[in-house]
Image: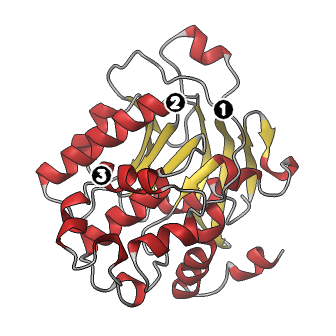
Amino acid sequence: TLLVEFRTLPEAVRQGRRSLLAAHFLPERQIGETAATDEKAGEPERIPAPAQASFRNADAASQTPLLEAQDLSFSYRKGQGVLQGLSFRIARGQHTAIVGASGAGKTTLAELLLGVWPPDSGTLRLCGTPYHELPAGAIQQAIAALPQGSVLFAGSIRENFARYRPACKEEDIRAALSDAQLSEVVAALPQGIDTPLGEDACFLSGGQRGRLLTAIAIAGKEPVILLDEPTCGLDQKTAAALMAALFARVQETGQTLLTITHERTLLHHFQQTIELRK
């Protein structure tokens, strides 16, 4: 396929391709309703790669996973494997952190889950169905994601929501901005959410830009919300408030949170941790 051919291109091209694809990860239609989140929370479960995830109770283990990887391997160039033999299962409501050193494959795993690249070997399943058997658009209807570096438009916050989340009502936008800890930022803008942001939102700081991506990602009803370093560039107080708001939101909506992070202090929030190793 065309994506496979792109795998030999430089990292800059790969980043650009990922940004252009970001809009397609946030469609209006949904796969369907999700189950309630797991009410039990304990210590995060460490999953060295490669390894099989285990579950805290028999009920979680017996249900069809929301997402599942079996013996997953991927490389951008022959002989330079990024992921090798990775297996895990994520149940509905089993909020999961993806951690690992730089270069361990965290972003690559996210791209595989989003269908940007096909794996070299192994199988990815969504609700029990292998990715290659899914109907067109199924992944985008199931997983909401705007990775770091995704395109933001030069118009206002309202216009960015209109582009990515055309079904969002005013109250949905305000609620997402509040959960993303952007209410004070918006209040300080000359025209509020109608203030132009500049090319690729250049008038926002890095942390504000990242929080706007988070706000857009969480504003829909996809069963899975995949966030890429949502606390990057934030002070400890803002990061803590953001994570508390995110978990309160998914507890209410029944969505499942999947988060790439290097902040190990956040891991106690998650029911499961997938740790990738070089």
Please say whether residue 216 is visible from this viewpoint.
yes
- Figure quadrant of the N terminus: bottom right
Q: Residue at x 32, y 62 (%)?
A: 211
Are dots 2 and 3 in contact, CB under 8 Å? no
The amino acid on which the numbered mark 2 sits, given as a three-letter code, is Gly
Q: CA distance from mark 2 to mark 1?
A: 9 Å
Element under label 2? loop
Q: CA distance from mark 2 to mark 3?
A: 19 Å
- Say left or right for 184 vs 198: left
The amino acid on which the numbered mark 3 sits, given as a three-letter code, is Ser
Q: Which residue is mark 2?
A: 254
Measured along the vertical axis of the image, is residue 172 above or below residue 244? below
- Looking at the picture, how far across and down is residue 54, in whole percent? 53, 23
Mark 3 or 1, which is nearer the eye?
A: 3
Query: Which numbered circle lies on residue 60?
Result: none
Are dots 2 and 1 in contact, CB under 8 Å? yes
- Looking at the picture, how far across and down is residue 101, in whole percent? 35, 57
- Figure quadrant of the C terminus: bottom left
Q: CA distance from mark 3 to mark 1?
A: 24 Å
Q: Which residue is mark 3?
A: 178
In the depicted view, which residue is nearer to us: 106 or 170? 170
Q: Which residue is mark 1?
A: 33
- Looking at the picture, how far across and down is residue 100, in whole percent? 38, 52
The amino acid on which the numbered mark 1 sits, given as a three-letter code, is Glu
Element under label 3? helix
Q: Residues within 10 Å of mark 1 (few under 14, many from 20)?
A: few
- Say left or right for 258 vs 22: left
Measured along the vertical axis of the image, is residue 246 above or below residue 76? above
Mark 2 or 3, which is nearer the eye?
A: 3
